[in-house]
Amino acid sequence: MLRLGLAREAIDAGLFLWKLLDHLVIDQAPVANPLPISTYTDEDFVGDLKIAAQQSLGQGFLRLIAPDGCMLDPRARLSDWLRDGDVVSAVASEPRLGATYGAFALWCSGCGKVVTWGHRPSGGDSEKVQDLLENVEQIQATHRAFAAILTDGRVVVWGDAEYGGKAPPGDRLRNVKQIQATQFAFAAILSDERVVTWGDAQCGGDSSGVQNQLRTVQRICATHYSFAAILADGSVITWGHQASGGDSSAVQNQLSNVKGIWATKRAFAAILLDGSVVTWGNPEYGGDSCEVQHELINVQQLQATGHAFAALLQDGTVVTWGHAASGGDSRRVAHRLKDVKTLYASEHAFAAITHDGGAVTWGDPACGGDSFKVQDQLKNVLHIEATHFSFAAVLADRSVVTWGDHRSGGDSRRVQDQLRNVWKIHATHFAFTAICRDGTVVTWGKPEYGGDSTDVRESFLCLP
């Protein structure tokens, strides 16, 4: 908890100045670098004070709390809320990002506002539901719609109605704990561990055929067209488009003690507790792992492009299968896939971070599978994010390196000088958003799909 001292001082008839005192405490302990003395008139806004605190503390997302416990609106004037000698509390919040294929949603947990931008029909326009978006905890997305879980377990949806942007009839979305999505439908896990689905019936929006089996559901995973639910006993229930993973009858007797499930566009792969893997769905999308089954031992992590899977084994090596051009064939870089730490994926390419902080890529060169031009920069890599066609790596010094399709975020030169002290990155199919520690939000990629946030810059100030 941060506390900012304020004093109101008359300097002339009808003119007052607010001074931000030169002390600051966190839980009663002085801060090493206190805020400098700043002055504000009665006509200045709470947002001005908030900016000063953010810049001095290097913390971009602060809620200013008045002495009476009310959160201060950044758009309000200082004189409307504060008095001489008031102590304002500043609470740090963690920003979060969600994305459809062409729109972003930015919010802070428990905050009363969500900022959206990008392709308006795909969730970039949330104006009609903005008043309902109070105390948002989680946001999930289909291809063209968002669903937000509120603190009280209710759900607010917006975007294209045919992609889940219209809530199911009645009062079924109560006490929601978690939401997962295919490209066209949502599935919500309730507090009683049952499931409610809505959206395109053929793509998972209709779960009536398995509803009686959807008990004690712990987690849900999705291909583009079907769902797979892991139950408390480690078994799996699937529904949706049958040829895209919705029918798991061929491997049902193998689906026990399931630890986790990953998905390409049309196939699933499950890791069992013993480290083995079970696959099902369209064979051309990784649904058939027979050729590498003998290698899938002690699997620690799975990752998926749209058409292929990659498995990270306990010894740090990697096994791949599925469509060769989409990363299913890793023989070109097999000699470098040793001591791998984590796997990432775009639509048609994989990227691996090794324990020494290096990066290895393979798959479609047009989608980031060839990082040769930036390879000498890919050192001390912390994590990687991907659009459909490009990658962005955050390095240990919190700078960013990008590669892949330049139109979809692979070229960040326009904003490179802003990409400093980057905290986290998220992506639509065609654009990136980076959040910096000081609260700066940086976007690049295709403007119409989230790469240009100019129109909502002022709204960022109102977060959290």
Image (cartoon, grey):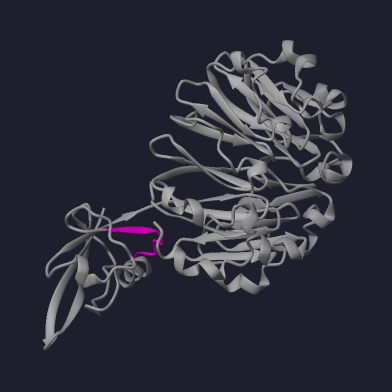
The residue lying toward the viewer, choosing from 142 and 272, is 142
Q: Percent x, y for residue 275? A: 68, 22
Using the rendered view, name the quadrant where residue 18 is placed. bottom left
Query: At x 65% / y 74%, what residue is drawn?
Result: 414
Q: Is residue 274 visible?
A: no
Q: Percent x, y for residue 102? A: 66, 55
Q: Is residue 320 magenta?
A: no
* Quadrant for the C terminus in the image: bottom left
In the image, is 367 to the left or to the right of 75? right
The residue lying toward the viewer, choosing from 255 and 130, is 130
Q: Percent x, y for residue 339? A: 69, 40
Q: Is residue 335 above or below residue 201?
A: below
Q: Find the magenta span and give its range.
A: 57-64
Q: Residue furthest bottom?
A: 12
In the image, is 21 to the left or to the right of 336? left
The residue lying toward the viewer, choosing from 325 and 48, is 48
Q: Is residue 178 above or below residue 100?
A: above
Query: At x 47% / y 30%, what residue is drawn?
Result: 171
In the image, is 332 to the left or to the right of 310? right
